[in-house]
Image (cartoon, helix red, strand yellow):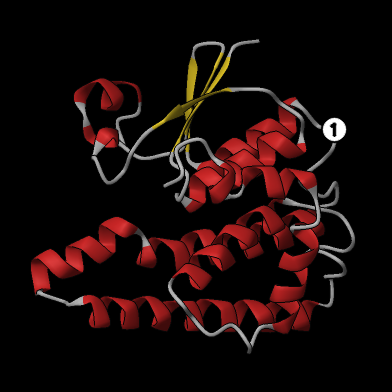
Amino acid sequence: MSRQLYTFFRSSTSFRLRIALAYKRLDYEPHHVSLPKMEHRVPSYRDVNPQGLVPLLIEDGRPLIQSMAIIEYLDEIYPDPPLMPKDPVGRVYVRAVSQIIGCEIHPLNNVRVLKYLKAQYGADEEATNAWYAHWVVEGLSSLEAYLTREGLSGDFCYGNTVTMADICLVPQIFNARRFNCSLDAYPKLLAITDRCMTLDAFRAAEPSKQADAF
């Protein structure tokens, strides 16, 4: 099995996929793509990934894009240990938690969005940080409330088993901390993150442990 991962250490979507691969004990050859150097935009990379983003996983010559889609693919091909519940209610819950993060928080705080705010509208550092913090509060507040209302969380987002929801949560908390966002209002999310970070797969995948970290 040939498996190559195109990743950037600080990319939260790459972080997600590194966790999933480590959790399932799937080896891969890393290729470090520098986002600050715009290496994800060069023609040779976009020939393989037309979206020009990371991560990109190439498995036996097949390019796979979009972190959550790849995680579900890996869970179908390599089901042990599972990252999705077996029952439909559990799966829709895990997908909802994952999409609150992956669709409602992360896109608005993506580096390319922050850069666009600066370039197109002249937003300074204070303004872009305020933008970031606003959407973190919007997203994490609703996520904390959703977990509380559903009553399905335990040690992790779904009971006492790691799922894709946890894999999406941890990188988002890392990013929020990097931007000095106050997280005191989210005790459930922070407790889950702390438990995740006791696991080898999460620790091995964290940004500071990557070869391209700077």
> Please, which residue is most extreme toward the bottom here?
185
Q: Residue 140 in the image: x percent, y percent?
A: 57, 78
Q: Is residue 57 above or below residue 136?
A: above
| Residue labelled with disc 1 | 80
Give the residue at x 59% y 41%. 17
Give the residue at x 32% y 58%. 111
Tell me the SS state at disc 1: loop
Which amino acid type is marked by label 1?
Asp
Give the residue at x 30% y 36%. 52
Q: Is residue 173 above or below residue 9?
A: below
Q: Residue 189 in the image: x percent, y percent?
A: 70, 74
Q: Is residue 124 above or below residue 56?
A: below
Q: Residue 62 in the image: x percent, y percent?
A: 50, 17
Q: Nearer the viewer, residue 68 or 184?
A: 184
Q: Residue 72 in the image: x percent, y percent?
A: 66, 39
Taking the image as shown, residue 138 lies to the left or right of residue 24, namely left
